[in-house]
Image (spheres, rainbow, N blue to C red):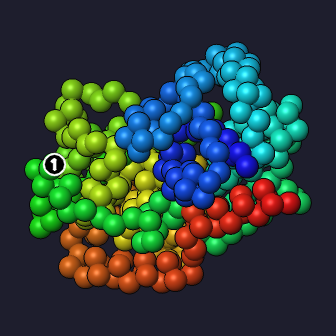
Amino acid sequence: MKVLFDIGHPAHVHLFRNAINCLKKRGYQVEVTARDKDIAIELLKNYNINYKRIGKNKKGILKKALNMIIIDYKLLLIAKKFEPNLIVSAGSPYAAHVSKILKVPSIAFVDTEHANLTAKITYPFTYIICTPSCYKKDHGKKQVRYEGYHELAYLHPNKFTPDPKVLIKLGLNEKEKIIIVRLVSWEASHDIKDKGFERSQDIIKILEHYGKVIITSEKKLPEELRPYKMNVPPEDMHHLLNYASLYIGESATMASESAALGTPAIFVSTSTRSYTDELEEKYGLVYNFSDPIDGQKKALDKAIEILSSESLEKEIKIRREVMLAEKIDVTEYMINLIEGYLEI
């Protein structure tokens, strides 16, 4: 049996890499296609996952539309040659279009409700839409829900063991407070009209009084913030995040990753996510700030409160255990779903 995975973002590499390796070990033929988005290609290489590059993400709605035709065609050629029994993606419109053309079933693992444009050109052609149970939209009979988050496909304790040697490699130690700040480019189609920090410089200048600030950014940093950027190998980032005292940033994915690891997380964005909402409301692992007027100020106040607390670290670890007891190993769920569909 043959399964084709389509990768469009670095987060998709993490989401599917354990399932890809497991399926290969079980004797399935697996093909991976990928677009050159941020460090997606680099991650595939680092995890020794063979792939076929089918293009690069473009900026702007018009360029994205024209690029879609090209990528659809490239993926179609690869899929026709490979002849998959199933196509799997994280809501890739290209995968959905090709699956419809070839009449091959497709599964989309999605967790972001406000990706409305992508949804309109993807879900009508998708066979199964697989979402976390907290996902707020209803996609009808195609939708199946599970008790978990994307990040538990690769950061569940069954799949991830933090390595303290990463800190030594980066010139850090477990005793110092590490504060990870994530800045995004806001160029994704689902990020249109959204924003995060008003002035990240103001946040960082204050936070550096409480620990070592490390910036990871999708966009070019202004001169004054470049000293805070650390060249962290992509495969080491989750280990670093595990040992951090705080994550604060514009990436919902990294906020959820922090929660999965038991690191206090602050998510700053005018758009919201059902999974970060649940991680705050039900488990107290993420703090969300979406108010465009005073969101940054409130986020900074919460960051200072967390960094000044002597008891919160232990409390967060306890909250994480509660969350893990109620959620599943998402990779195992994914494999069972794929194998079950292939057996039909």
Residue 55 sits in quarter: top right
Which amino acid type is marked by label 1?
Leu
Q: Is residue 239 above or below residue 262?
A: above
Residue 131 in the image: x percent, y percent?
Answer: 69, 60
Q: Residue at x 51, y 64 (%)?
A: 152
Q: Looking at the rendering, in which quadrant would you find the C terminus?
A: bottom right
Q: Residue at x 12, y 60 (%)?
A: 173
Q: Residue at x 23, y 47 (%)?
A: 214
Q: Is residue 68 above or below residue 30?
A: above
Q: Residue at x 46, y 75 (%)?
A: 284
Left or right, 13 with respect to 79, comes to left
Left or right, 184 with respect to 108, comes to left
Query: SS class of the residue under badge 1?
Result: loop
Residue 172 sits in quarter: bottom left
Q: Which residue is mark 1?
A: 170
Residue 48 in the image: x percent, y percent?
Answer: 42, 41
Residue nearest the viewer, comparing 221 with 337 = 337
Residue 26 in the image: x percent, y percent?
Answer: 60, 58
Left or right, 266 with respect to 334, comes to left
Would residue 295 be seen by someone viewing this image from the given angle?
A: no
Q: Is residue 3 above or below residue 45?
A: below
Would residue 3 be seen by someone viewing this image from the given angle?
A: yes
Residue nearest the viewer, comparing 229 with 186 = 229
Q: Residue furthest front?
A: 27
Residue 216 in the image: x percent, y percent?
Answer: 32, 42
